[in-house]
Amino acid sequence: MDRAALRMVCSPQFWRMAILWTLSLLHSYLLVFLRGRTAIPRRRRPRTGAGGEGRRPICVVTGATSGLGKAAAAALAREGYHVVLAGRCMQLLSEAVEKIQRQQSDAYLEAFQLDLSSYRSIKKFESSLKQWILETNSEPAIQLLVNNAGILAKSHRITEDGLDEMIQTNYIGPFILTNILVPLLKNSPVPSRVVNLTSFTHRCVFTYPVSGIDVSEGALRGMKLGQCSAGKSYHLASSYEYTKLCLLLFSYELHQQLHISSAVSVMAADPGAVETNIMRELPPCLSWFAFSVLRFLNLLQQTDSGVGAVLDAALAPAEASGEYFFGGKGRTIRSSRLSYDTEVAKKLWAESSALFKELQLRGRDLGTN
Ligand SMILES: NC(=O)c1ccc[n+]([C@@H]2O[C@H](COP(=O)([O-])OP(=O)(O)OC[C@H]3O[C@@H](n4cnc5c(N)ncnc54)[C@H](OP(=O)(O)O)[C@@H]3O)[C@@H](O)[C@H]2O)c1
């Protein structure tokens, strides 16, 4: 074991991940068990999208170069979607497209660069996507957005927008992207959908009183993390949990806003524990150890089964909007009590919108918009 690994093992954040994350995963499976054999929402193949007969519905998958995003892109192409793979690195995107095409020669795929930790990149993605839709003669509409991209960062890094990288990638970026793409989702001639990839780790955010969670602009910028990193330790586990809870609060609030007034449904998907590259920033011996323990406890899935919850959420009937899909096999459970707090969700929405507006104004000054 090297020094970095040793330092991590000695940190409270490591033990938080080792103990609380395992307990929250077990808690989720216990809820599945207690729910028993309730009716499972059946998967439906997507209906023809914009542009009429013969045209495939369009879906966007973020973080499609690795793990669950790559598996979801392949599976959704098989279901008949024209899949837009969005990711940071063009080289990795081309490799992912080639790999899917080798397995499915009739897959409809497109690749676009998108870095969720950059407002400029999100705006560039929006215009490339719209341009491509226009050129392919489709109506300006998409049918599915899968907010999959996410990181487990080991240090407090500040993005070009001045935010903490993990918070921006896992929450603020998806919030902005979704709001930017909502008009395209609403334009769809068939019901459309947003699927947000959250995690059982959101259950580890405890506050007293229950609604005492800090969703102020400062917290969303990661300013508190900046203060703790000055004291050397970055709270990687609690920050990751926080971003996943924010994404979940956002999902339920978006469901409230869209599902009644439009044909856009919103689902949360939690795959459980899956062997992917999510722990790439941790010392390799620790991620190997974590995966070995989870495998021993029979709690670890491979990506082909782990992607089940994402497909369940993407293909469930629209009436399942606002549900939390967990662990595949069509299963839905309740998420944490805090995640259903509508007051916190509204405050989070207001603070996130203020940040979005600020980035828009700054972008206008720099000529990005
Ligand atoms: N694995 C699990 O056990 C588990 C459990 C619950 C939830 N999840 C969630 O599932 C999602 C997928 O994670 P994974 O397990 O498949 O991990 P992964 O293999 O590391 O994949 C993460 C993907 O996100 C992309 N990404 C990272 N930062 C990005 C950015 N700034 N802009 C655009 N794309 C970015 C990565 O792209 P690059 O290739 O460019 O890095 C990669 O394609 C995450 O949201 C994660 O939180 C995972």
Image (tube, grey):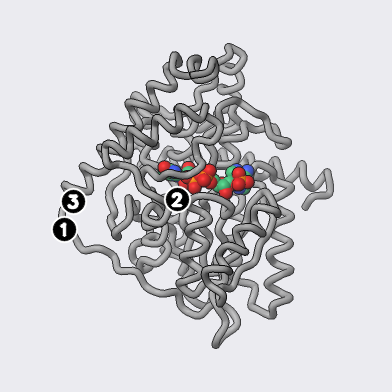
Tag 1: residue type?
Arg
Q: Foreground mark, 2 or 1?
A: 1
- Mark 3, residue position: 35
> Which residue has dot 2 on it?
251
Q: Height in image: 260 above or below 354? A: below
Instruction: Give the Cα separation between the discs numbered 1 and 3.
Output: 7 Å
Secondary structure category for the residue under label 2: helix
Q: Position of residue 346 (x, y in %)?
A: 47, 43
Q: Residue furthest top?
A: 231
Residue 361: x %, y % from top left: 75, 44
Q: Are there few (<14), some (14-19), or many (20+) residues within 10 Å of tag 3? A: few
Please tell me whether mark 3 sits on a helix, a strand or a loop: helix
- Foreground mark, 2 or 3, reads 3
Quarter location, residue 266: bottom left
N-term-proximal mark, 2 vs 1? 1
Beta carbon at label 1 within 8 Å of ligand 1: no
Spatial CA distance of label 2 from label 1 is 26 Å
Relative height, residue 258 to residue 285 (above, below): below
Q: As rendered, which of 201 and 352 lies closer to the eye?
A: 201
Classify residue 223 as left or right of residue 162. Answer: left
As helix, strand or loop, the secondary structure at mark 1 comes to loop
Disc 2 marks a residue whose amino acid type is Ser
* Mark 1, residue position: 37
Seen at 62% across and 64% down, the residue is 98
Q: Are marks 1 and 3 in contact (CB under 8 Å)?
A: no
